[in-house]
């Protein structure tokens, strides 16, 4: 989406993006890699080239050699339609095109392992493959294999799955960094927004509910006027959604699916905040633009959860 388009406009597989100062702005540290001795000159050339793009409102050199790009409001707002129409493909990109990945390490079935570190390592390997293929990489056909059925286990992971459910355990493991603290089944089973394993699925259900209630009243997404999506919360949600394919690619490149799971938790928080405002809870008066945004949030969260191998229920 926007970050994928920005990566192509910059002309680098990894433009080293980070969030800019306002929604719809992105800062790249690429000039420091292009010319370590004089990054500011490299940044000036890059900013000049990016300024020629019609969907970019401003590209400027910031600090000692960063480039900060701000897209037009229309480009940011229209992301709602683009994501909703793209479906699961909204998380895909060509950032890792041309790379071949080895799936061999992802063959260990999670329920059959005896410890949390083993389970985390097995899931991280599996998810890195999933994320990499979504970012354009291909699996080495000579190394591809079908995971064996999990052997019986009565270890802590199996006990947690029995208590909290497979999706809660899977998300908690996906979010667990290397060497991180093992999840507690009693915590990840809780249906509270402070529990990310629940909050991400709840956010998806909340966005789906807005669309369901509107449809019950005969209202569906139709026309779209970009300027009508301008509330701070709406812009923040659009900005968070714009990072989806880039977060997939970066997590795959770094072999850190926990970073992608953390991003989904942030996206969920933005979604819940926005879907809770009166602009979205007063369904009879909801605008078509906000229905598109609810659909985009639902679509983006479903795509992210799908990459983690987790169900995205429309109701909780």
Image (tube, rainbow, N blue to C red):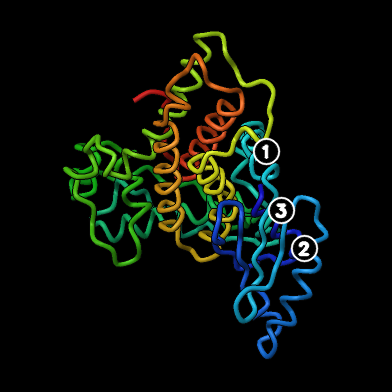
- Label 1 secondary element: loop
Which tag, 1 or 3, sits closer to the chain's start? 3
| Quarter of the figure with the C terminus | top left
> Horizontal placement of 290 versus 194: left or right?
right
Q: Are marks 2 and 3 in contact (CB under 8 Å)?
A: no
Which tag, 2 or 3, sits closer to the chain's start? 3
**Marks 2/1: CA–CA distance:** 20 Å
- The residue located at (59%, 17%) in the rendering is 220
The numbered dot on residue 96 is none
- Label 3 secondary element: helix
The numbered dot on residue 50 is 2
> Horizontal placement of 273 versus 191: left or right?
right
Q: Which mark is in front, 1 or 3?
A: 1
The residue identified by callout 1 is 78
Residue 181 image offset from top left, x and y in percent: 24, 61
Viewer-side residue, 112 vs 214: 214
The residue identified by callout 3 is 5
Viewer-side residue, 35 vs 197: 35
> Horizontal placement of 249 versus 110: left or right?
right
Which tag, 2 or 1, sits closer to the chain's start? 2
Neighbor class of circle 3 (other Cα within 10 Å; few <14, some 14-19, many 20+) is few
Neighbor class of circle 2 (other Cα within 10 Å; few <14, some 14-19, many 20+) is many
- The residue located at (69%, 60%) in the rendering is 7
User: How many numbered marks have been drawn onto this rendered protein structure?
Assistant: 3
Residue 282 image offset from top left, x and y in percent: 44, 20
72 above or below 31?
above
- The residue located at (58%, 57%) in the rendering is 249
**Marks 1/3: CA–CA distance:** 14 Å
């Amino acid at each position: 989406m926007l970050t994928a388009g920005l990566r192509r406009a910059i002309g680098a597989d990894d433009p080293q993006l980070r969030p800019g100062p306002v929604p719809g702005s992105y800062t790249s540290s690429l000039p420091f890699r292009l010319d370590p001795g004089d990054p500011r000159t490299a940044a000036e050339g890059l900013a000049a080239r990016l300024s020629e793009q019609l969907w970019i409102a401003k590209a400027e050199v910031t600090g000692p050699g960063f480039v900060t790009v701000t897209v037009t409001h229309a480009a940011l707002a229209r992301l709602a339609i683009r994501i909703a129409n793209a479906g699961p493909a909204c998380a895909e990109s060509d950032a890792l095109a041309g790379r071949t990945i080895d799936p061999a390490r992802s063959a260990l079935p999670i329920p059959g392992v005896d410890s949390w570190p083993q389970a985390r390592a097995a899931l991280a390997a599996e998810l890195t493959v999933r994320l990499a293929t979504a970012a354009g990489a291909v699996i080495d056909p000579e190394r591809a294999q079908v995971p064996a059925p999990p052997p019986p286990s009565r270890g802590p992971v199996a006990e947690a799955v029995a208590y909290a459910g497979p999706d809660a355990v899977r998300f908690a493991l996906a979010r667990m960094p290397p060497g991180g603290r093992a999840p507690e089944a009693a915590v990840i089973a809780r249906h509270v927004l402070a529990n990310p394993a629940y909050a991400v699925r709840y956010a998806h259900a909340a966005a789906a509910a807005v669309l369901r209630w509107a449809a019950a009243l005969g209202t569906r997404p139709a026309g779209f006027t970009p300027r009508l999506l301008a509330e701070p919360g709406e812009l923040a949600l659009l900005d968070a959604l714009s990072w989806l394919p880039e977060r997939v690619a970066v997590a795959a490149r770094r072999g850190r699916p926990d970073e992608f799971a953390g991003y989904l938790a942030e996206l969920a928080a933005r979604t819940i905040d926005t879907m809770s405002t009166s602009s979205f809870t007063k369904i009879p008066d909801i605008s078509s633009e906000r229905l598109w945004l609810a659909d985009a949030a639902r679509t983006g969260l479903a795509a992210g959860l799908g990459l983690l191998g987790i169900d995205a229920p429309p109701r909780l």
